Amino acid sequence: MKSVLKIFYRPPFIGVLAFLLVFISQGLGHTLWMLVSMIFGHDYQYLAAFILGLIGLFLLFVGMKKENEVAATWLGYFAAVLMWTGWVEYSFHFYSDLSETEVRFFMQSTTGIMMVTLSYFFFNKETRCNFFKWFHRNLRLSTGKPTSGYKRNYAAITAMETIYVMWFFYIILYLLYEFAGDRSPVTYTFFFFNSIWALFLLFRLAKFWNVTRAVRYAIPTALIAFASYEILLRWDILSEIWLYPKKYVFELILISTAISIGFLIAVFTPEGEKERLAKGSEVQN
């Protein structure tokens, strides 16, 4: 068994496995949303969603106390998925039902809030975000030197980054569909360049040796790729099985089991072995 698991100690498996875990869990998040609605019905779904968000908050609390970077990162990610599904998506649907207004208008109305709050993270001198740092370098936006000895909280960072990336792409897609149309040249262009971006990031991810960096890099990479996947669903090129748990019960159970095993492999494969191989690779290079 140990010899079989060793394949996950090396590229491209470290990065690809993390990518698949995030990508598929995004789809399963849609399934979770549907199951809450189906099981609890209209009268109790919002209470259940609130509890779902509390579970996410608990995972975030546990993750923030974890010393292990991999565990903290994954806890932060899943905390974000649960809080987004339970507190954000369901709150939009609640007020959509209350006001008899389409959900997309509520999401679009948060564009200003996202931009204002995002400015805090953009100008944060402690940021390690490659995307933000690229703008800092090329636009010569010095935000000051990072604090010496500053210890990052990986669960909190991962949770916030996950929520903001999901939020960003929700708004982008809604705005594209609203003002350009799902089959307009603008949407086709966005799909083309977004897919190239996702593939470029995935190519880089496949070279990662360090598991903690791979996981943190895989999350935005998979979320970017998922935006292109959402457009393919909109074009009816693919079928969104995530929204039909009754129809695809066997497939979803199979996918959930596989993703659970993958997650266990990602978390419990020996960290020391990966680090040793990574150092060996650096010496060879």
Image (spheres, rainbow, N blue to C red):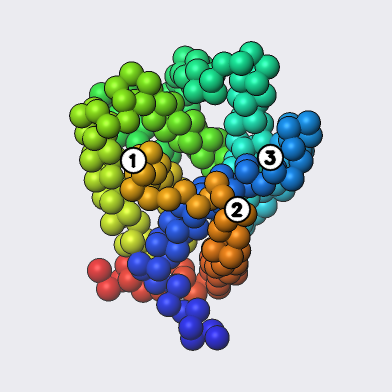
Name the element at disc 2: loop
Answer with mark 3 or mark 2, whichever residue precedes in sequence: 3
Q: Left or right? Give the position of 34 relative to 40.
A: left
Q: Amino acid at mark 2?
A: Pro
**Residue 220 seen in the current view:** no
Name the residue tied to disc 3: 37
Residue 175 shown left or right of residue 285 in the figure: right
Residue 54 placement (x, y as % from top left):
75, 38
Instruction: Say the numbered circle drawn on residue 34.
Output: none
Please report the residue visible at 42 percent of the width from the left and 26 percent of the height from the top: 174
Q: Depth check: 163 or 269 in front? A: 163
Mark 2 and mark 1 lie on one chain; the one further toward the N terminus is 1
User: How far apart, in angstroms, are the residues tagged by discs 2 and 1?
Assistant: 21 Å
**Amino acid type indicated by mark 1:** Trp
Q: CA distance from mark 1 to mark 3?
A: 25 Å
Callout 1: SS:
loop
- For disc 2, the marked residue is 245
Residue 78, position in %: x, y?
A: 61, 48
Q: Which residue is mark 1?
A: 235
